[in-house]
Amino acid sequence: MESPPRSGAALPMTSGAVMLPVADIDRAKSFYERLGWRLDIEFTTTPAGPPQGLFLLVEDIEAAHGELRRRDIEVSDVWHLEPGEGRRPGRDPDRRSYLSRASFADPDGNTWVLQEITDRLPDPEQVRHSGALAHLLYEASVRRGEFEAVAPPHDWWDWYAAYMEACEQGSTQEQAGQAAARRMATIRRIVVGSA
């Protein structure tokens, strides 16, 4: 079953395709159709036991909770996690992302957790860990010292940028140093050529 794009009668929830084991396919279809979802494919065999705690992301937990009740879906009361204290009743008073929740189950025991997200965390792939970046800068400074000893005057940031980019693309330290040297040679040709 998959949550379709936000249009028509579907609840405003976000999830990808999820394979669910069910005992009665018609009963499951009826339940999920009330949510406005669609069936993508039926399998003849599925893993044993129902999945638990599948997350559905919503922008407004109270609106989603009310809409589930309106569609005759039995849903828990809204609750939130208070960091350092645990579970508390009601929506997080400050509406902090990821803390407000409610849950419901389908007739086969597959449980879903609504989670309110008002401000998404950045994609982990796009966030640099400062310790890793510091290590890369240190490594670049050591390699640049070797280059500096034989190179004519230049802007250090051009060398660093080329070196670090090569490292992030999987080059070894030696390969990254060579890539940075090639970049500096190109920059020198551009500067000389434009004079």
Image (tube, rainbow, N blue to C red):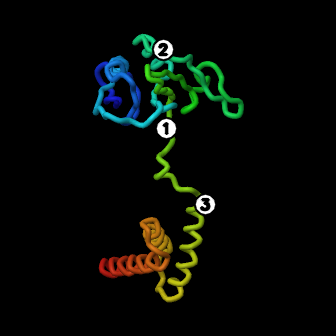
Q: Are circles 1 and 3 on residues that touch, CB within 8 Å? A: no
Name the one closer to the observer, 175 or 40.
40
Which residue is under mark 1?
Answer: 120
Q: Are circles 1 and 2 on residues that touch, CB within 8 Å? A: no
Q: Secondary structure at mark 3?
A: helix
Residue at (47, 86) in percent of width and height: 151
Which residue is under mark 2?
Answer: 74
Label 1, label 3: how far apart the Cα atoms are:
23 Å
Label 2, label 3: how far apart the Cα atoms are:
47 Å
Residue mark closest to the camera, 1 vs 2: 2
Q: In the image, residue 152 lies at what x, y percent?
A: 46, 86
Pick the quarter of the image with the C terminus: bottom left
Which residue is under mark 3?
Answer: 131
Q: Secondary structure at mark 2?
A: loop
Name the one closer to the observer, 126 or 191.
126
Q: In the image, residue 174 lies at what x, y percent?
A: 47, 80
Label 1, label 2: how far apart the Cα atoms are:
27 Å
Residue at (46, 52) in percent of width and height: 125
Q: Is residue 173 above or below residue 52?
A: below
Would residue 58 be seen by someone viewing this image from the given angle? yes
